[in-house]
Amino acid sequence: MAPVFQTEKTEGNARLGVILTPHGRVETPAFMPVGTAATVKGLTPRELWELGARIVVANTYHLFIRPGVVPVRRCGGLHAFMAWPGVILTDSGGYQIVSLNQLAQVLDDGVVFRSPWDGTLVTLSPKLVVSVQLEWGSDIVMVLDHCPPWPAGRRAVQQSVERTVRWARQSQQVFWEKLAKNDSFWSPPSRPLLFGIVQGGVYADLRKACATALAEMELDGYAIGGVSVGEPEELLVESIEATVPWLPTGKPRYAMGLGEPWQVVELVARGVDLFDCVLPTRLARHGVAYTSCGRLSLRRKELSEDVSPLEEGCSCYACQHFSRAYLRHLWKAREILGVVLLSLHNTCYYVSLMQRIRDALRAGEWERFRRAFLGHNRKGGEVWE
């Protein structure tokens, strides 16, 4: 069977590679803009593509509830539904099921929850979640996992690990049963990929146990879940470090829900290949832009007469055409255009950062790049707000 992930070069634990999918190659390390409800907030698919994004994340939980399975299918699948020509990774929604529903009941065979839109009871099982993602034509299918809230005791986390591994096995079974009905799906890059999700909270031995069990299943890739859920920063990094050594070196690794630019750089150094985070568009809605010197808040009064762009040398439409003064005016006046332009810039920043990381790895200058970047962008150094 052809490999789904090819490593081109390494420097330390950092890896330059490529993932093969039905809708194209994903050069890694890569950042995936978050299109939870089949849209990246404030941006059109064409704008994303022109920025250089080649993969986005959608959420099975949200789309299963609204608009539902049938409308997406009748539109020709998720790619046609959202007019996205690139790669789509669909998160299973395991985290959202628990975090967004106080009445969610986690059972051995799935989760029963109440729809936040109309109050009806909905049940999602590991097999159903995978079946839906395949029906929608997802390129990277995520298994249903059980992500315990922070903080959670050891016994609760251990139970979530056992449930996550059991659900992953069920997911893998239905995945191959579905693919067996379509001969063209049997080998990459024509077939979708199945990723497992490692849980284990802040307990290193439980993360090892979960990662080892999932690695034995020989899935196509592995996500590191249960991080960035409210735990202290140092525990987040420790959880990643406790997981990566137990994952196969020949498979892509995905840190879910991360993160800040400095976190991305630090985790690339620890061997992580894929990242997603809502911060680029979420902070745009709060009038905050990413720059090479950290975050820049449009709340700053002195920007009202600043004729410079958000970031000198940035190729995005916002920086090429508009001043900080104008963008501050839009945000203060609560004009939609302000949010759109900031979302465009912030997403461009992240996509460009990943290109710079790949360029540094390709040139053998990764450690030099890492030191220089963290010298300006470590947490605590963001003094522009």
Image (cartoon, rainbow, N blue to C red):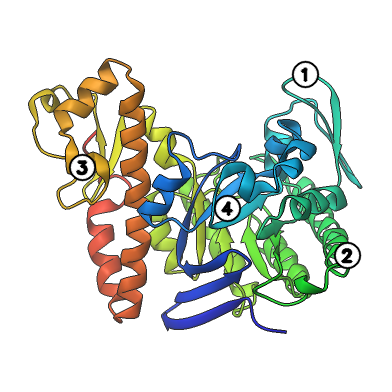
First in sequence: mark 3 vs mark 2: 2
Name the residue that disc number 2 marks. Answer: 173
Do tag 1 and tag 3 residues touch (Cβ < 8 Å)?
no
Q: CA distance from mark 1 to mark 4?
A: 29 Å
Q: CA distance from mark 4 to mark 2?
A: 24 Å
Q: Which type of secondary structure does the marked residue at label 1 adopt?
A: loop
Name the residue that disc number 3 marks. Answer: 319
First in sequence: mark 1 vs mark 4: 1
Q: CA distance from mark 3 to mark 2?
A: 49 Å
Amino acid on which disc 3 is placed: Cys
Amino acid on which disc 1 is placed: Asp
Instruction: Count neighbours of disc 1 (C-alpha within 10 A) and say few if under 14, some if 14 to 19, many if 20 or more.
Output: few
Mark carried by residue 74: none
- Front-most of residues 155 and 30: 30
Q: Which type of secondary structure does the marked residue at label 2 adopt?
A: helix
Q: Is residue 275 above or below residue 73?
A: below
Residue at image point 76% right, 34% down: 68
Instruction: Count neighbours of disc 3 (C-alpha within 10 A) and say few if under 14, some if 14 to 19, many if 20 or more.
Output: many
Q: CA distance from mark 4 to mark 3?
A: 29 Å
Return the x and y of residue 241 as percentages of the image width and height: 54, 65
Residue at image point 70% right, 43% down: 60
Return the x and y of residue 194 as percentages of the image width and height: 72, 64
